[in-house]
Amino acid sequence: MKYAPPAAPRGASAEAGTVLVPYPPFWRQYPSRVGALCLVELQKMRRDRTELVTRAIQPALWLIIFGETFSRIRAIPTGSVPYLDFLAPGILAQSALFIAIFYGIQIIWERDAGVLTKLLVTPTPRSALVTGKAFAAGVRALTQAVVVLVLAAVLGVALTGNPLKLAGVAVVLLLSAAFFSCLSMTIAGLVLTRDRLMGIGQAITMPLFFGSNALYPVALMPAWLQVISHANPLSYEVDALRGLLIGTPAHLALDFAVLVVAVVLGVASASALLGRLAR
Amino acid sequence: MTGKGGNGMDVDGIPPAVLCEELRYRFGEHRAVDGVSLRVVPGEIFGLLGPNGAGKTTTIRVLTTLLPLQEGRAAVFGVDVARRRMEVRRLMGYVPQQLSANGALTGRENVSLFARLFDVPRRERRDRVAESLEVMGLTGDADRVAATYSGGMVRRLELAQALVNHPRLLILDEPTIGLDPLARSGVWERLNELRATTGMTVLVTTHSMDEADTMCDRVALMHLGRLRAIGTPAELKSALGEDATLEDVFRHHAGDALNDDRLPQGGFSEVRTTRRTAGRLG
């Protein structure tokens, strides 16, 4: 057996019996934790490709059935943009939302299984753990997005080929999935059980979706719904995606700012509640 | 117990691996830990014994920084558990009671994750992961997903995860619960080898008196949140009589606690937690 002995007591000072263990500075630990947790997500996904297919069914139905039908009815005024083109970024956002909003279930599962306990005993600040999980959800959403984008392209949506804009799309999806998974983890920290989280997740997903600009322009909404839509991060996500993917006028700076602030707040609230899951 | 200086250190100037002074922890009205004081000497296998609900797991959860310190003092190798949590975590490897490996990942990926979370430098990472797996006898199965492992292999995998940061203190909460006798001895064999080669300190909770008797250098008997006796298994037994077993010692100090209905051991959640341990990964 070659197992190296544990380090001898380093710097055991006579005064307080302290042991000094060198480790990387905080600013380097943070990205490494996030990277480690995203890597785990990729490793898991590599073995579960069926999920990629099953999760593609719903966005496909939205694009093919809803999209194609409403394109013909011409009920929704989208100016010079064909309705299917208008819809595609909305469905892209929706598929990321569906993945992220149930991500808290994984954290409850990990709590029940003991995985979370062990993660919490590593030298990882809770906010880094939550950020890692949030971006892991983002990684999962991104792979799903590729499927949806390919499908949209096949259906004839005029998507951008500009790599810079596509990179922007990836960032928007990452940030949004990170936010919605933090929302999910926050709810997980409040309700603590899988069943209740499922219930709440299902209750809020559709209002978030219909209360945004994903399916129709905000201008069509009654005034009160417009107010809600402006408070809904999904609207900013869709606005940015639409601007980047099909070139409609968008408020990119505002959209990014809102998403970044939302992620910061989401990480803060989910980390504050993570301790409840550990008990 | 060994003598100690004014600042919690042993007379020879080496801080104890674990030091608890008047540790108390309450869940609402229930006093789970009620004034526990103990010190674990570096290099020993120390067993915390007691029936379900004795306060063993709560004590460990305070030491591992999972629960905040409410009252008293606790330190690991002289590092205060309440004030320097991140440093304490770097000194420890911890295996919780439940099966905690990720069944969707391979053995190697499971260990590798912990190498990253403990900041094992990139150039050492591969070797350290391989070494931990080898020490636990999992090299041949390292690239299979953990969901296909047997119970004993999962336990050894969890130990490999806990060892990858070269901890100075290994904390194991009921490491052999839910395992068949063969798997149990397999786990203990590996732990003994490890201790012999590295001199690592091991703090282990168990409610199996037999295991504690054969495997631990010293044991503390815990009952209703308090320590009832502490010493080597031989000392504790001989104090009671020639043919006494550790179980007799326990009955002597704690009454017939192993069959006491007032204890929380019969609770649904307790049983659920314990049984979950048996068959979860699949």
Image (tube, helix red, strand yellow):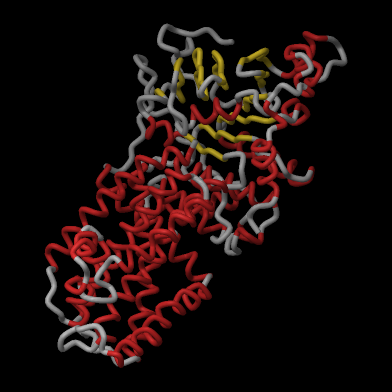
Looking at the image, which is closer to me, A256 or A190? A190
Looking at the image, which is closer to me, B99 or B133? B99
Query: Can residue A171 be seen in this snapshot?
Result: no
Q: Is residue B135 above or below residue A60?
A: above
Could you tell me which residue is drawn at 40 percent across and 86 percent down?
A65
Residue B37 in percent (x, y) is at 54, 14
Q: Is residue B50 left or right of residue A36?
A: right
Q: Is residue B191 above or below residue B246?
A: below
Q: In terms of image quadrants, where is residue A250? A: bottom left
Tell me how many marks there are: 0
Q: Quadrant of the N terminus of chain B?
A: top right
Residue A92 in percent (x, y) is at 32, 75
Q: In terms of image quadrants, where is residue A143? A: bottom left
Q: Is residue B65 left or right of residue B133?
A: left
Looking at the image, which is closer to me, A30 or A264? A264
Could you tell me which residue is drawn at 38 percent across and 63 percent down?
A205
Could you tell me which residue is drawn at 42 percent across and 6 percent down?
B6
Residue B204 in percent (x, y) is at 62, 30
Could you tell me which residue is drawn at 45 percent across and 13 percent down?
B9
Q: Is residue B176 left or right of residue A67?
A: right
Query: Can residue A43 be seen in this snapshot?
Result: yes
Q: Quadrant of the C terminus of chain B?
A: bottom right
Q: Is residue A177 above or below residue A166?
A: above
Looking at the image, which is closer to me, B2 or B208? B208
Q: Is residue B172 above or below residue A94?
A: above
Residue B78 in percent (x, y) is at 42, 21
